[in-house]
Amino acid sequence: MIQGFNPRTGEPAGQPVAETTDADVDAAAEAAAAALTSWTGLGDQGRARALEAVADALDARAGELVALADEETALGETRLTGEVARTTGQLRLFAGVLRDGSYADPVASPAAGGIAEIRRVNHPVGPVAVFAASNFPFAFSVAGGDTAAALAAGCPVVVKAHEGHPQTSVATARIVAEALAGTGAPAGVFGLVHGFEAGIRLLTHPAITAAGFTGSTRGGLELGRICAERDTPIPFYGELGAVNPVVVLPGAAASSTAEIASGYAGSLTLGAGQFCTNPGLLFVPADDVALSAAVTDAVGASSGGPMLSERIFKGYEAALAEIEAHPAVTAVAAGTTGAGPWGATPRLFQATLKDFAADLPVLAKERFGPAGLMISYPSVEDLLPVLAALEGNLVGSVHGDTASAAGVAAARQVIAVFERTVGRIVWNGWPTGVAVNAAQHHGGPWPATTVPAYTSVGSAAIRRWLIPVAYQNLPAELLPARLAD
Amino acid sequence: MIQGFNPRTGEPAGQPVAETTDADVDAAAEAAAAALTSWTGLGDQGRARALEAVADALDARAGELVALADEETALGETRLTGEVARTTGQLRLFAGVLRDGSYADPVASPAAGGIAEIRRVNHPVGPVAVFAASNFPFAFSVAGGDTAAALAAGCPVVVKAHEGHPQTSVATARIVAEALAGTGAPAGVFGLVHGFEAGIRLLTHPAITAAGFTGSTRGGLELGRICAERDTPIPFYGELGAVNPVVVLPGAAASSTAEIASGYAGSLTLGAGQFCTNPGLLFVPADDVALSAAVTDAVGASSGGPMLSERIFKGYEAALAEIEAHPAVTAVAAGTTGAGPWGATPRLFQATLKDFAADLPVLAKERFGPAGLMISYPSVEDLLPVLAALEGNLVGSVHGDTASAAGVAAARQVIAVFERTVGRIVWNGWPTGVAVNAAQHHGGPWPATTVPAYTSVGSAAIRRWLIPVAYQNLPAELLPARLAD
């Protein structure tokens, strides 16, 4: 049985949910495969209407969903209400992508020099397995971005629920399934399974043609390996770990020390630091003592929150213990511990660039939670090779000032490194808060993601679930409708 | 030492080439990494000119290259001259892709509701390792499609030469390197290594960020595993095995029996059957005795050629021995054996649909060479589930007639299955001969390719080597030029 817990008390939240049996996992995968043709057959307009119906249904029951999720995650009503809105906004965004139609990328090359005409268009990859994340019980869960993008692409979806919010998952899935059924979508186009073993069985089921995952590097590595070792390997889109470096350039904080300090502490502690975009590394000029002091004060004045689960809390504590014991690191600030048995304490550590660079495997690794490491660098010249040596990240942020030529030059140097190592570059801002739009890229080199060319957020996320088919010399009546003109 | 052989005689062809030392492999990878910024910095126009210079240089020395390749591959002057033209055509195609510029896919989402503006554009993934194939000594080798696409994308390239044509590889690489140097391209933007161990070392070098491969399923699986198990895993684009089913629909051969029979035999035996698009499986109506007889006669009247290497020849012989020994298969035709010690004999085998379906692991597997299996099917209804059960293929071909409603309906059913299982669908034609243009998709589900969304042929092949970067809130002077307007 899968039991959710209330992070504010550590007590069980709601009834336990049964792990899905092997037979039921197989049935869900096979139902998804059986639904493929009729789901695709609804066409762009039909699927757009279905996605909008799901969005409307979730909005209509947002209060109930938020209450369930708040009990299971303690993320709070404000955040969770906003997250439901983001989730239904995503569904409507993909409805718009379908109405626009250009996602199908139709291309024609005319016959030439004895070579027949070829036309090409995107098709859905097939039934998709989506692994829900713990830290976004709506936006990266049952009806989250992967589900919306895959359904939009024409792919039936089977979600493996996250064990951290089983009741929220069940309630969301019921609403989704009912709304889809009400729009004429085929049974089987959406399914939900519970449990670790069920997830593995789903991933290895022959009917599943691709998978999406958001979670830990270790878990993602294992699931990716399973996908690669199937009799028929399938694409695995994993978003794994990130520390999202922030660089404050020399002089940037001159007139905005307080703003940068409070902005950093706010981004670091948002959601108890449980974001893939959390800014775990802050690079500050060694000679800007005022900035280091202000950041230290801001983190010290910040508050943690209850973490999502005992497992995450224990992982955070272990990560803190490791960095606290590091001889090159100084613990400089601790904020107010969050409520409940798994309350996180915001922490700030400090190290020199040289010491940091000497032990990247320990010091540059992700500490999931509100723990920042502030690294004092003597010069941009010294900083650049260390930045370049970091593993891939979702986001790199730069705080700078373009008023001087030196400021522009330094910014360009850091941006050039980030262009090789992160998926998104933020100027004078913070990495948390991921806009859901056409230009978004929520990806990045390993281990931020397993497939760096694909985003999991924004309208381009539909590309994960599409594969092209070329048609050579076909008469119009045999071409797909959107190629036939 | 790596020694090429003349397939017409089995004797050594030219001097042996030394295997690249570990130090030289590392130097090539590091030089590629060092060249990245200046190669990208040449811009679209500069890289287009460089690709054209390479094409011009190869064309100018085509005679010499063809002579070398003919000695090492015995593919013949006509085919090889055409292949050099295809290769230089590919380079010029990508120059056109660069001048067009839309490959960079720039997108902007304006600021809205407190969310900062985001702009996104594609960047080169970084230095790329390209593994050359045996069967296209130009078009899928040193200056082939992967090299052209990766250089176009802005990626330095290190090629691992195929051991089957070392002298051709060395000569081609020299011409490429000289031409690039003449256009101001940085040293290191193009390198060549020789030997199995050198290839593995290249693939695991930290500077390499992606890899392309065309070859056997077994080899591709192993290289893909190496890419996945690196400290920093990298994308691996492998084109592995395919049997490329051809379906002749009922009635389709009524007026074109001879044409279909000769067309099939021609496609099957082209290049001694050594194509990834070779039509290994031919599905014919069981009641069309005239067609079966005509195909049998056509293959019996065909001629093989010298195979590329002893290894490929022995693999072909082993595959023939396996299928000949199969109790459900009848050997119905043998053409004229090709010249030399590794001369291939065109072969045709026959089985019923029921027997074929009962042993797909043996009967549906690739037999690299001019061996066809003709499968007699009782009805389209019976055929469809067997087609659907085949593994992924690069190409599926349908011969049919749209004059009748029944003909259209049957064609649609087969096409619907192929849309799930192949990368390209050909109507009343043959799978060999891959057009290099914008609409081409030379890909397909596993094991045809490891990443089904990507093509290795045509202008879309540049996508293999691109990753997006999003820019949030950047002032114009810090944006890449093509996002700054």
Image: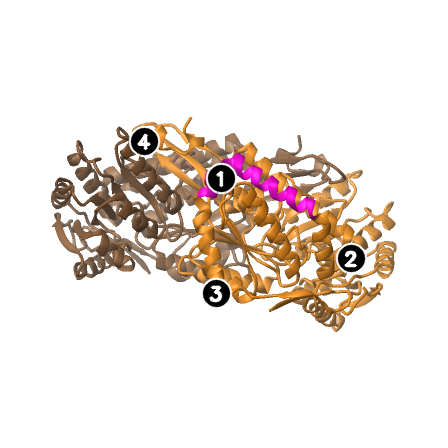
Chain colours: A orange, B brown
Same chain, labels 4 and 1? no
Q: Does the magenta stretch include residue A184?
A: no
Any part of residue A355 in sight: yes
Measuring from the top left, give residue A334's x and y in whole percent.
83, 65
Q: What residue did someone put label 3 on?
A: A22
Q: Give the range drawn in magenta.
A: A38-61
The alpha-carbon separation of the residues under discs 3 and 2 comes to 40 Å
Give how far apart the Cα atoms at labels 2 and 1 are. 43 Å
Residue mark closest to the camera, 3 vs 2 = 3
Q: Please check the rendered image and state whether residue A41 is part of the magenta-colored stretch, yes or no.
A: yes
Residue highlighted by disc 2: A269
Q: How crowded is mark 3: few (under 14 residues within 10 Å), some or many (20 or more)?
A: some
Quarter of the rendering containing residue B57: top left
Q: Mark 4: which secondary structure?
A: loop
Cβ–Cβ under 8 Å for marks 3 and 4 = no
**How busy is the neighbourhood of tag 1: few (under 14 within 10 Å), some, or many (20 plus)?**
many
Q: Estimate the x, y position of residue A131 in percent, counting from the top left.
A: 57, 57
| Of pointers 2 and 4, the one earlier in the residue sequence | 4
At label 1, the amino acid type is Ala
Q: In this view, does B332 lie above or below A50?
A: below
Closest to the camera, between mark 2 and mark 1, is 2
The residue under label 1 is B152
User: Looking at the image, is mark 2 or mark 4 nearer the viewer?
Assistant: 2
In this picture, residue B245 sits left or right of residue A216: left
Q: Mark 4 points at which residue?
A: A115
Which of A31 and B257 lies nearest the eye of the viewer? A31
Q: Mark 3 lies on which chain?
A: A
C-alpha distance separating marks 3 and 4: 50 Å
The residue positioned 44% from the left and 51% from the top of the image is A33
